[in-house]
Each structure stands twice: as structure tokens, then as C-alpha cells.
Image: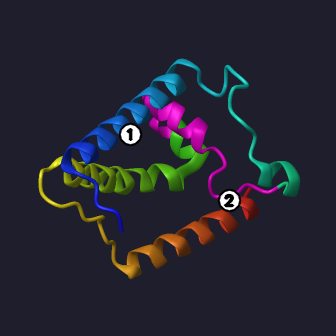
Amino acid sequence: MIRASPCRRRWIANSLLATVILLCAVLYAYPPARTSLYPACPIRQFLGIDCPGCGTTRALAALLHGHLTEALRLNALFILLLSIALAGAIETYRRAIRATSFDWPNPPAASIYATLAATAIFTVARNVLH
């Protein structure tokens, strides 16, 4: 594993944060309902089923506009897991900008398996109930 200097780590972390903020600003200014800027899901396009990520872009746009119920309707799994992902991203950012050595967060295997199982159940349920 290549170890980056603290200065380089901070630069990379801040660049990634700026990129995420910029992408959220673009999504806020150009929501999917008003523009064709965003690509269609290839799984939905070719197989005719909703993948676990279908509706994620529209859900995030709705969330950025403060429409929580609309976001949950579009992709409830994404919205529910977003808080966990944000907590992980904040912790990773905090570790990356500090002066000591950087270690990636190491989630327990059980949480990874639980997330994969929830994703599979969500995918089946949204296609059966849809």
C-alpha cells in the first residue's frame, strides 16, 4: 500500500469534498425531472426491472430540495443508508485530514452482509410490489 504524505492526503480529501459539493450543487440546480443530463439505468432499460439504484439520483435531488417523503418514495433504501454512508464518509475525511497516519475504516463483515441482504430483499420487493 502506498502511503501519501499528510499534505497530499489533505489535498485529496478536500478535493473530493469539493467535488461532492459541486455535484450536489449541479443536481440541485438541474434536477432529473427538468433535464435529460443524467443517463438512464441500463438494467431498467434492457431488463425492464428496477435495480437497487433506480431512483437514487431523483431521490437525492428531492432530498436536496427538502422533499423527504418524495425521496423515500423514489428509493427508500438509498435514503435509509445515506446516513450510514455519510457517517462513514465524515469519519474517513476526519482521518484523512489529521496529521497522523491514515487507516481506512473497517466495517464488520456482518454489517456488509446485512447491507447486501437488505439490498437483495429491497430489489425483489420493489419489483414484485411495483
In the figure, 123 relative to 75: above or below?
Answer: below
Quarter of the picture holding the N terminus: bottom left
Which of the 4 image quarters holds residue 112? bottom left
Q: Residues within 10 Å of mark 2 (few under 14, many from 20)?
A: some
Tell me the amino acid under the disc marked 1. Leu
- Residue visible at 72% across and 37% down in the picture: 39
Q: Label 1, secondary structure: give it.
A: helix
Q: Please, is residue 40 above or below residue 65 in the view?
A: below
Which image quadrant is residue 110 in?
A: bottom left
Q: Is mark 2 on a helix, strand or loop?
A: helix
Residues drawn in magenta: 49-69
Local packing at callout 1 (Cα closer than 10 Å; few below 14, some 14-19, many 20+) is: few
Marks 1 and 2, how far apart at CA: 32 Å
Among the two numbered marks 1 and 2 on one chain, the one whose residue lies closer to the N terminus: 1
Residue shown at the point (67%, 49%) measured from the top left: 54
The three-letter amino acid code for the residue at tag 2 is Arg
- For the residue pair 103 and 125, the one nearer the viewer reads as 103
Q: Is residue 32 above or below residue 93?
A: above
User: Residue 16 got which mark?
Assistant: 1
Q: Where 107 sits versus 19, above or below?
A: below
Q: Residue 115: percent from the left, percent from the top?
A: 48, 70
Instruction: Tell whether position 31 is magenta.
Output: no
- The residue pinned by badge 2 equals 126
